[in-house]
Amino acid sequence: MAADIQASQSEIVHPLDHLIRTDRIPHIWCPGCGIGTVFSACLKAMISSRIDLEKTCMVSGIGCTGRAAGYLNLDSFHTTHGRAIPFATGLKLANPELNVIVFSGDGDLFAIGGNHFIHGARRNVDMTVICVNNFIYGMTGGQVGATTPVKAKTTTTPVGNPDAPFNLPLLAWASGANYVARWTMLHIRKLTACIEKALTRKGFSFIEVLAPCPTNYGRKNKENSLETLRLYRDKTIIKNNVDPSELDMDFEKGIILGEFVSRERPTCIENYDRTCRIP
Amino acid sequence: MTARSKNIKVITGNTAAAYAVLRCRPDVVSAYPITPQSELVEQLAKFHADGLLDCEYVAVEGENSAQNVACAAVMAGGRAFTATSSYGLVYMYDTMLQTSGYRAPLVMVNVNREPPGIHAVYSGQQDMICTRDSGWIQIVVENCQEILDTIIMSYRLAEDYDIQLPVMVNYDGYYLSFLAESVDIPEQEDVDRFLAPLKEQPQRMKLVAGAGTGCGSHGIGMGFVEYRKKHMAAMERSKELWDKIDQDFKNEFGRGYGGQIESYRCDDADIVLVATGSAVGTARTVIDAKREQGIKVGLVKLRFFRPFPVEKLCHILKGKKAIGVLDRSICFGWNCGPVFQEVCALTRHIGIMPMLSFIDGLANMDITKEHISGMVDEIYKASQNKPYQELTWLP
Ligand SMILES: Cc1ncc(C[n+]2csc(CCOP(=O)(O)OP(=O)(O)O)c2C)c(N)n1
Ligand code: SF4
């Protein structure tokens, strides 16, 4: 009997297995971590969007989220901390046929790499940027970042964070991104649909995804994974196309989710061709 | 009065570094976390939150900012501290050049880890090597007590009026950063007394409100050359002063490290092994064992890497029959270890003899007693005029 069960288990194949480097499993993510859910939403969207996977690549910076690129069974790049967007820019400009996905953490994209984000969006480089925002530097043990809420406890702000976090969708909109959305990893269907849309759109697309880091953020702020998910359910409200200045991160007031920007600014390559290439 | 406090705590290398910083009373600490340094900056944040460390603690958004904030804090007349490792060190490199060019006496810890290239969250001294021509004083230490003591001594050196240069204190990531050892934490008043001579010195160059000091403006022609010469001369002066500071520290706290280098059983030795960092502890036991077997071998622990302790090394190495150098990093383009390459440059003073390069301990590979024993055997062979291998990769 036990042998039967074992045999049938070994035949079970996860529907996303072909997109994963299964030899790297088990992954490093902690129990209760939200990154895996966002990663699988991304993989599902890659399939459902019908983009050519042979011409798709993923770039990550460094961090727990940054490990994603290493698990994807397509061309993938684990770059230096903060530099995923310039790396992705190089890939796209050298080979415009590529679908370029950047999958990285809030610290990577907005603290050490913040400068690149605004310039990627300003130039409207054709790529999809997915940011897993867990409010903290997960990988290095839970230090304060550019997205940590005011008063939140971290290992480098033991009495609470004095600084205001970025409003990421506002930053993306103001910098020039063509497409901007925010979800939590609990809103998995809407998230997947948005990633699917972003993958097929032209220009710079940005999706912020809130996800729990129980090991560092949760433990420091006395919030277990389930409580975080409850917050995602009870303290969020979906309002598409709302003014991005209303999207600040305040759980007391409620967090607004949805699709906020969908516009058609010319892309980096289009602008370049128009201005720099003599016909 | 001599301090003989015994406040022993079992703490990691990172925590020992944090205690040293606490005792040196910096005005500004700015840092960005990175494995294996994070515990150090977290400990400082905790001291700060607990009201023990009265400074501005700036949790910046990256190492480049960390170095800029710290450099500026020093230029404004304050005492500053920052710490990093590996990727972080090379990410602050442009500003490191600025800090040394401004002659800003900043003290920084670098917890050695392999830098970018092949992603490795492992120990190795390549990060320090990448920044060797930055105009910083670079010191490498062996154990947790030495981490604490060296940081305190480094402020005395950096801020000395005759020096005014930034100092980087290096210790092996993992092997020392996370190793818990018993460490004697000096009393605040004793450290205050040790650092007090700095207060009696002439005012160093700093920005004073209303004085109209312009820093970093264009250096043209001979002005530039003059500046470089002075920087170089200050580095040279730092060697002797470091030996003196080490002696002062020994008088005050009862612990000394020999200054630029420590020479172990070298006086009557025929052959010598040169090593740095945490591997020195292992090497010492091997040297003792080899001595028991009748091999006349000595050990040099290199503490100063920049400036390179030319005179002291020449004095010890002259007349030896063969020399081996253990590197935890590599020297691209020379097919050897970087410290080995520097020791080779001494031959113009000490003459030609067999020199052997050993590259070991990259990416957290343990440098074992067996490895070092093999090194000594190979150096011995070379000293007997037998054929030997110039470069050996271990394991
Ligand atoms: C230049 C540099 N500085 C610091 C680090 C250390 N480091 C690695 S990941 C990380 C933060 C990651 O946070 P985030 O991007 O939010 O990702 P998470 O781990 O939370 O998914 C830091 C500071 C590094 N790798 N490189
Ligand atoms: S530390 Fe946090 S972000 Fe990293 S894997 Fe664990 S739960 Fe996830």
Image: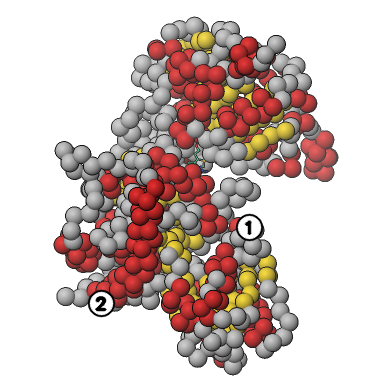
Q: Is residue B84 left or right of residue B385?
A: left
Does residue B148 sit above or below B50 in this rendering? below
Quarter placement of the C terminus of chain A: top right
Q: Which mark is residue B251?
A: 2
**Residue found at x 33% / y 52%:** B103
Residue A138 screen position, x and y as percent = 49, 38
The residue wearing badge 1 is B332
Which chain is home to disc 2?
A: B
Q: Is residue B390 or residue A55 the one in the foreground? A: B390
Is residue B138 visible in the rendered image? The answer is: yes
Outermost residue on the bottom side: it is B294
Residue B102 screen position, x and y as percent = 33, 49
Q: Is residue B162 left or right of residue B338?
A: left
Residue A151, quarter of the rendered image: top left
Residue A6, quarter of the rendered image: top right
Does residue B101 sit above or below B188 in this rendering? above
Residue B314 screen position, x and y as percent = 48, 79
Q: Secondary structure at mark 2?
A: helix
Q: Is residue A41 left or right of residue A167?
A: right
Q: Secondary structure at mark 1?
A: loop
**Residue found at x 67% / y 13%:** A278
Q: Residues within 10 Å of mark 1 (few under 14, many from 20)?
A: few
The Cα atoms of the two marked residues, 2 and 1, are separated by 42 Å
Mark 2 vs mark 1, foreground winner is: 1
Q: Is residue B227 or residue B364 the one in the foreground? A: B227
Specify the amino acid type for callout 2: Asn
